Image (cartoon, rainbow, N blue to C red):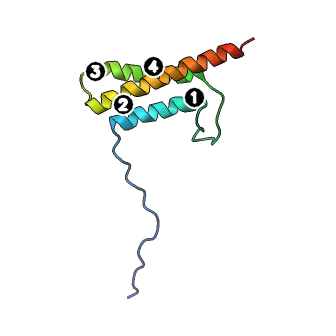
Amino acid sequence: MAEQQPDERPRPQQPEEISFIGFVISLASTAAVHFGDVENPVSGTKGTPDLLAARQMIDILSLLEQKTKGNLTAEERTVLEQVLYELRMRFVQAAAKEQRSQP
């Protein structure tokens, strides 16, 4: 009987369990794409800023903050607060830049 070769096909990896902090960082990364700060993972290019879409990500994170109040660990709360602060400051900066470039 012939000896069987081990299956050399790559097996799909089990997705890592998503954490609250990972989810927050994912939403923040999406906001960064909308600000035009990082490359779009699909196209591989930096797009033009879309402040409405970036604002939507900030609003979603703000909603998460409101709805999870009192149910987060100290680390989760700190990360969420810091991400929201940084995104809000980035939004103000981007909006001011956009306003200055308008005729």
User: Label 1: few (<14), some or many (≥20) within 10 Å?
Assistant: many
Q: Earlier in the sequence, mark 3 or mark 4?
A: 4
* Side of 19 relative to 28 (left or right): left
SS at circle 2: helix
Considering only vertical position in the picture, is 66 above or below 34?
A: above
Q: Nearer the viewer, residue 91 or 44?
A: 91
Q: Amino acid at mark 1?
A: His
SS at circle 1: helix
For the N terminus, give its image quadrant. Answer: bottom left
- From the top left corner, tell me how far across and down residue 78 is, in percent: 33, 28
Does the residue at mark 3 contact the one at mark 1 (Cβ under 8 Å)? no
Does the residue at mark 3 contact the one at mark 4 (Cβ under 8 Å)? no
Q: Amino acid at mark 3?
A: Lys
Say which residue label 1 marks. 34
Q: Residue at x 51, y 32 (%)?
A: 30
For the C terminus, give its image quadrant. Answer: top right
Where residue 81 sits, quadrant-wise, is top left
SS at circle 4: helix
Considering only vertical position in the picture, is 64 above or below 13?
A: above
Say which residue label 3 marks. 69
Work out how far the residue at label 3 is from the one at label 1, CA to CA, in angstroms. 27 Å
- Residue 59 is marked as 4
Say which residue label 2 marks. 79
User: Label 3: few (<14), some or many (≥20) within 10 Å?
Assistant: few
Does the residue at mark 3 contact the one at mark 2 (Cβ under 8 Å)? no
Q: Amino acid at mark 2?
A: Val
Q: Nearer the viewer, residue 9 or 24?
A: 24
